[in-house]
Image (spheres, rainbow, N blue to C red):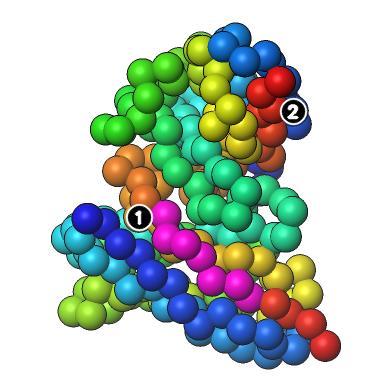
Amino acid sequence: EVQLLESGGDLVQPGGSLRLSCAASGFIFSSYTMNWVRQAPGKGLEWVSSISGTGGTTYYADSVKGRFTVSRDNSKNTLYLQMNSLRVEDTAIYYCAKALGDSEYWGQGTLVTVSS
Amino acid sequence: QAGLTQPPSVSKGLRQTATLTCTGNSDNVGSQGAAWLQQHQGHPPKLLSYRDNNRPSGISERLSASRSGNTASLTITGLQPEDEADYYCSAWDSSLNAWVFGGGTKLTVL
């Protein structure tokens, strides 16, 4: 059974940093592109970043480019999102998602709140 | 990054048929195909259909998806109370090198 468990969400001040993790199980982690997608309170889904199975290719939304960094450790079956220079508008539930548009599966999400 | 266009809301009666639409362009829906997601309040999204009309195992046969040009559609027949949810479409945009989502359609079953 596929499982994705996000962690690391917290309350942080504007300009601060946070690192999210997503622990994966139930599938061959290194074979799949992994993604971060966020959802602001009461709003729709917004893609944040994707990383290929090897970690060699990454993509970012314009809204986070230069501030967020996606990475993965295939030996630990874990996906990461390093978030720097956080802004109030980054407040959202951050979901880890396996293989968007294919054998897609979403975690339960972790809440990031950016507020002073 | 521009998103896909979905109507904000659709209302249909119990046991009726609802068709939800999602319009993109030739760089995303038109060439890459679309996926459909269902999200109930307080829960993560769940995949209903991918690459236009492929339905994952366990998804009800009352749901079917299709595409015509740059517009994808999700049809739900025999509407049930549990179908009331937010529905999102998504597609890879080969020009932006980004995933794009629709704004979501809130389906109300009367």
Measured along the vertical axis of the image, is residue B71 above or below residue A8? above
Residue A80, percent from left and from top = 41, 76
Q: Which chain carries label 2?
A: B
Left or right of residue A108: residue B50: left
Splitting the image into 4 quarters, where does residue B47 fall?
top left
Report x, y in % for residue A108: 47, 62
Of residues A20 and B29, the one nearer the viewer is A20
Can you give x and y, in whole percent of width and height, for residue B52 in the image? 41, 24
Residue that badge 1 annotates: A98
Look at 57% across and 44% down and name the residue there: B40
Let me know if marks 1 and 2 both belong to one chain. Answer: no
In terms of image quadrants, where is residue A103? Answer: top left
Q: Which of A29 and A61 is in front in this view?
A: A29
Residue stretch rendered in magenta on the structure: A106-112
- The residue tagged 2 is B9
**Are there few (<14), some (14-19), or many (20+) residues within 10 Å of tag 1?**
many
Instruction: Out of B106 and A84, give the one closest to the viewer.
Output: B106
Q: Can residue B5 be seen in this view?
A: no
Q: Residue at the spot x=76%, y=68% of the render?
A: A89
Position of residue B56 relative to residue A14, above or below, is above
Q: What residue type is labelled 2?
A: Ser
Give the total of numbered labels: 2
**Residue at the spot 23% in from the left edge and 80% down from the top edge:** A76
Kind of residue sitting beneath label 1: Lys
Q: For residue A72, say whether it is visible.
A: yes
Q: What element carries label 1?
A: strand
